[in-house]
Amino acid sequence: MAPLSFNLHSNRQLHGSGFQRNHRAYIALGSNLGDRVDMIEKACKEMEVKGDIRILRTSSLWETKAMYVLDQENFVNGACEIETSLHPIELLDRLQLIENQLGRVKVIDKGPRNIDLDILLYDKATFLNERLQIPHPLMLEREFVLRPLCELIPEETLPSPYPQGSLIDHLSRITVSEDPISSLTPLSRSLPPITAHHSHRKTHVMSILNITPDSFSDGGHHSVADLPSLKRTVMSHIEAGVMILDVGGQSTRPGATQVTGEEEMARVLPTIKLIRSLPDSRNVAVSVDTYRADVADAAINAGADIVNDVSAGTLDPEMISTVARLGCTVCLMHMRGTPETMDKLTSYPDGVVETVGRELLDRVRAAEAAGIRRWRIILDPGIGFAKTKDQNLELLRRLGDLRNFPGLQGFPWLVGASRKAFVGKITGVKEAKERTWGTAAAISAAIQGGADIVRVHDVQEMAKVVKMADAVWRV
């Protein structure tokens, strides 16, 4: 596409009568050197340091092959929506200063860079001078620009003289590469990110490590009072091939009595420290299964990588702001009420898939408003939480529909069906620990539907199920 010609808008025209202090702009984020996600997150933090830029939302991060100069590493690209009082040139100066502070050295045009920040859109304005052109002159030919923008403003149109039509229309007309791009979600510094749009991706096995006396199927099996036994359990999980160890110190089974935060931490923190003391845990992520902000904070500082909140931030009003401050990945699960009341909250008159999608989207928006980056979010449909047997089955059967729910595309999904009561009802197995075969079928269904993580009790058996299911469906 040849650059478009514009009339020059002077500073007076942009700052004339009707000037508003807070302008809406969209910034492209890119990196292909070093720790790419970390560099983008540092840039986002720097944008907000002075208080005249506020990030409202971010897109997912998308991994793409280089364009123009092909002999370089893959890029990670995204976009953020900001509110700012800065004039376009002032905003450009700020972004270039951040690039310099983060060590960017421009060797060749469109070549390798550790950080790249570009102004894509600024209000509904056009702007052109020797340093800056808005809208960005090449944005309509770049999938790695349009796809992130379409997560934020799919129906937005560009000002004249740009070609008319919504951004999503422009994206649909781009020739898609033979190697489709994918969003990516970091788990830990030592693990590759989840690539939820790659059909050949491997499913991650998350093992359940309940340090509780009253969990529904393994209560009392693990305790910090017996660290040698706990260590053997952890090692057996790692040796079986788990990628994530999910540590919980509070049972969320239906009707469970809630312990204090202090008791939960007394169970969780020594376990995380034990895991992190093991050399074999270097290539394993640790998540903390908690709905309490103070427990999440302490767990991340003790070495956990992920917060797995069954309430998606509804049971502790401080949770999502705490996760935003920590900058870690979070799993937001669909649940209604509390563990004591959820079994009475199973009415979904609009359909369970439609309602779970809508209610999870509300939690995503709350997380974004608190400052959690979209690329740091994993979703969970909440199998067994405020769901009947038939509703659980429908969620498994239609997980693909949930993945494509408007506003939720691009997120990775975690499914936890292991040993759940509905499995026992269907198979006629009363003892939760004996529900292995039914769990295996549920896990297979989840993978067929597109789950990226499966949360399991029977680690060795389910690791084999996952390998087989991946061989069938992840091609």
Image (tube, rainbow, N blue to C red):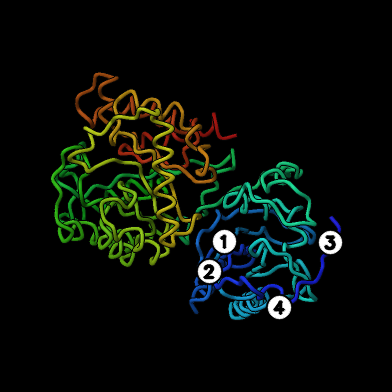
Name the amino acid type tagged 2.
Cys
Q: Whole-Å distance between the Cαs marked 1 and 4?
A: 27 Å
Seen at 50% across and 69% down, the residue is: 54
Q: Nearer the viewer, residue 152 or 39?
A: 152
Q: Earlier in the sequence, mark 2 or mark 4?
A: 4
Q: Nearer the viewer, mark 1 or mark 4?
A: 4
Q: Position of residue 23 (x, y in %)?
A: 58, 67
Question: The N terminus appears in which quarter of the rendering?
Answer: bottom right
Residue where numbered disc 3 is placed: 3
Q: Nearer the viewer, mark 1 or mark 2?
A: 1
Q: Position of residue 20 (x, y in %)?
A: 57, 71
Q: Earlier in the sequence, mark 1 or mark 2?
A: 2
Residue where numbered disc 1 is placed: 80
Q: Whole-Å distance between the Cαs marked 4 and 3?
A: 25 Å
In the figure, is residue 412 to the left or right of 314? right
Q: Position of residue 376 (x, y in %)?
A: 46, 56
Name the amino acid type tagged 3.
Pro
In the figure, is residue 429 to the left or right of 469? left
Residue 29 seen anywhere in this rendered image of the structure: no
SS for callout 3: loop
